[in-house]
Amino acid sequence: MATTRRRAVPRPTPEAPVTPGLAFFLLAVALVVAVVVHQSLSQRQRRQEDHESRLELLASISTLEEVQKELFRRKTLAAMGELAGSVGHDLRSPLAVIRNSTHLLQNLGAEPEGKAAEYLALIDKQVERADKIISNLLDFSRTATTEPALVDLEEFFASLLAEFPVPPGIEIRHHPGPAATLRIDPSQLRQVVVNIMNNAVQAIGASGTIDIESRSAGGRTILAISNSGPPIQHHAIKKIFDPLFSTRPGGVGLGLAIVKNLVEANGGEIAVETGEAGSTFRLEFASAGPGAGGAVDG
């Protein structure tokens, strides 16, 4: 008769008791790990805070520099305006004498002929040019005092474009948007647009196009005047509204400076963009609402 052998089942070994020394050791390790983790997180947080502080400091310095530049620009403009006004008034009197003398010579007895007629015509032309420069100096020197009225843009451009002298070879295209009205000084808006269009004509040269668009968005009205002339050089973009800056030979550099002054006096903003297809001047003003016509605000 076969006998069955039973396999001995090992008894479980009792767990070693946690001694006070072992517990203290484990607690110490846990504390060390916690301290290391805390220090690591604190250092990371401090680095992040330091980085953010540096960024805020750089932003503050940049803002301060911009404010200082703007203050310097305004002081410079004020000084230049005062000088321009003084010089302009002083030049008006002798220029009037030259103009009157030229007209007297042209109408004195027999009509001038040959070189005499040519030189008198040249003097008259240059006197007219000098008078225009003086007018620009005086416009620049005056603190713009606005007389706001409600201006319907469609009527405004229809009137202006009917009178603007368009040179041969240049086409002006008006793209009116939805009816829009501005509360603005009409004569100053006219001077702004005419100055920009004259600048566009000079930039285009023999042939090209000028496009005028208007649109409204978010309570603002944007006027865009684009020309197909050559792009403005990068170095000139930042200076284009500075007085006495001109890229055109013989240019005085006051037209766009006057434009900027008048736009800002009427609560607007102006910017210029340029590219291979030409340049665009963007004017932005607060909208006064549709359909108010040209009623003057009393």
Image (cartoon, helix red, strand yellow):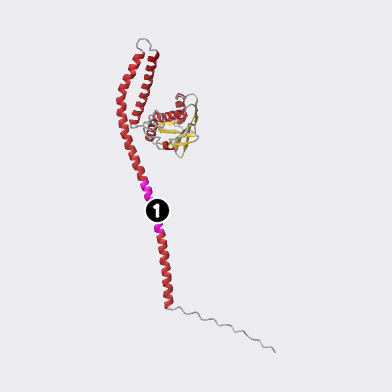
Q: Which residue is mark 1?
A: 52
**Which amino acid, mark 1?**
Glu
Q: Residue at x 42, y 62 (%)?
A: 40
Q: Residue furthest top?
A: 110
Majority secondary structure of the magenta segment? helix
Up/down of 28 relative to 296, above or below:
below
Span of residues in magenta: 45-62
- Give percent across and percent down for residue 148: 38, 32
Left or right placement of residue 34 versus residue 7 in this view: left
Q: Position of residue 149 (x, y in %)?
A: 39, 31
Mark 1: secondary structure: helix
Count of all numbered marks drawn on residues in the image: 1
Position of residue 91 measured from the top left corner of the image (x, y, whole percent): 31, 24
State the residue in front, 125 or 290. 125
Q: Quadrant of residue 130?
A: top left
Depth check: 147 or 194 in front? 194
Give the quadrant of the C terminus: top left
Residue 6 found in image quarter: bottom right
Q: Is residue 148 visible?
A: no
Furthest-bottom residue in this view? 1
Q: For the point 38% across and 50% down, which residue is it?
A: 56
| The N terminus sits in image quarter | bottom right
When asked about the image quadrant of residue 247, the answer is top left
Q: Residue at x 37, y 45 (%)?
A: 63
